[in-house]
Amino acid sequence: MYPEPAHHAPTERAVTAYQPTPLPPTIVHPAPVVPVQPGTVPAVASIVLPDGRIVTGYAIDAVRPEPVTAKPAVSRTAVNVALGGIGFLAVCGGLLLLTSFIAALTAFIGQLITLAAVIFGGWIAVQVLSASGHRGGTTVNIRRAVIKRNHFHG
């Protein structure tokens, strides 16, 4: 199913080795340190490193941040009282809405009960009043009944 791996003879490659070329040693003479007057920064600064090299560059003034204006201290108690007042007002508003909702729901249920009573009372009145004008069905008039030996003769 799979082809057998073919074994090849190892090929020899030419190996090239590169050797770094050393630089000729340079004689570094440390520059004399120029005394700087306090409070002034020269336009070009020179620094002598511990190994004797001299680094010269431009001096950069330190960036000074803008002064921050002091904010008046707010009492933690004042913050708590303010937050408590806001919470109290929110609760009162919620309770007011809740009581209004309960009152409206009570009135609605009362109206439904009244409507049901009117409809049911009207239905009963129609049933009672229509019984006097009875139409249809079987009418039995009993004038004189004779019961003999537990048997009814009409």
Image (cartoon, rainbow, N blue to C red):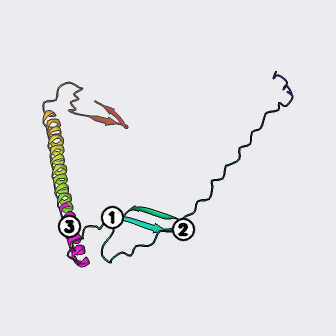
Q: Mark 3 points at which residue?
A: 86
Q: What element carries label 1?
A: loop
Note whether 144 is above or below 58 in the view shown.
Answer: above
Q: Mark 2 points at which residue?
A: 52
Q: Please state which of residues 135 and 5 is positioned toward the viewer in this rendering.
A: 5
Which mark identifies residue 73? none
Write the residue at 21% across / 58% down: 98
Q: Which of marks 2 and 1 is nearer the N terminus?
A: 1
Write the residue at 38% across / 76% down: 35
Choose mark 3 or mark 2, whichever is in front.
Answer: 2
Write the residue at 23% across / 26% down: 137
The residue segment tinted magenta is: 70-93
Q: In which quarter of the image is the N terminus?
A: top right
How much space separates mark 3 and mark 2, taking CA atoms?
Answer: 70 Å
Q: In the shown orientation, is residue 154 left or right of residue 26? A: left
Q: Please state which of residues 30 and 4 is positioned toward the viewer in this rendering.
A: 30
